[in-house]
Amino acid sequence: MTSAFARQGFLAALLAATFCLAACSKTPPSADPALDAEGFPSVYRPLYAATTQMTTEEAEGQQRALSGLAARRASGSISEAEYRRRVAEMRALGANHGADTLKQMNN
């Protein structure tokens, strides 16, 4: 009975050592510039934004455009269908803008 426990203990230790060695194995570094030569994230590389942030003037312009659209809808100068079409267009832009920008950056 004692040798069976000893054998199980040895096998468990061997299995644990195998997992440790597998976890410590070195993977080849990727071509990602954010990684150092050993494939680990570099904490010394300066971070830059993918694009510039929207300015206050741009944000105010967007707000005026959206407020103007709502005012034209309320006054009846544009139809409900036209209003809904423009809102759908803006929502599609918002939903797809990130993916479209990434495609442009990767080309």
Image (cartoon, rainbow, N blue to C red):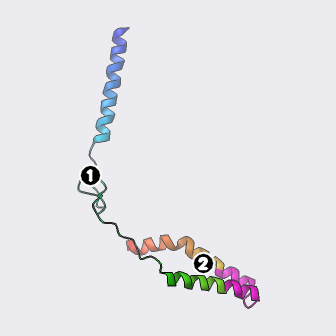
Q: Mark 2 points at which residue?
A: 90
Question: Which of the 4 quarters of the picture holds residue 42?
Answer: bottom left
Numbered circle sitting on residue 73: none
- Residue at 76%, 89% (x, y): give it: 76
Disc 1 residue type?
Answer: Pro
**Residue farthest bottom in this picture:** 77
Corner quadrant of residue 9? top left
Q: Which residue is drawn at 36% across and 13% down?
A: 4
Q: Is residue 18 magenta?
A: no
Query: Looking at the image, is mark 1 or mark 2 nearer the viewer?
Result: 2
Apparent side of residue 100 relative to residue 1 in the rendered image (left or right): right
- Residue in front for this viewpoint, 103 or 59: 59
- Residue 27: image x %, image y %? 28, 48
Disc 1: CA contacts within 10 A as few (<14), some (14-19) or many (>=20): few
The stretch in magenta equals 69-86
**Residue 28 in picture, x, y percent from top left:** 26, 52
User: Pointer 1: what residue?
Assistant: 28
Going by the numbered disc 2, the residue's amino acid type is Met
Residue 38 against residue 33 in the figure, above or below: above
Under circle 2, the secondary element is: helix
Find out whether residue 84 is within the magenta segment: yes
Q: Residue furthest left?
A: 37
**Dot 2 alpha-carbon crowd within 10 angstroms: few under 14, some 14 to 19, many 20 or more:** few
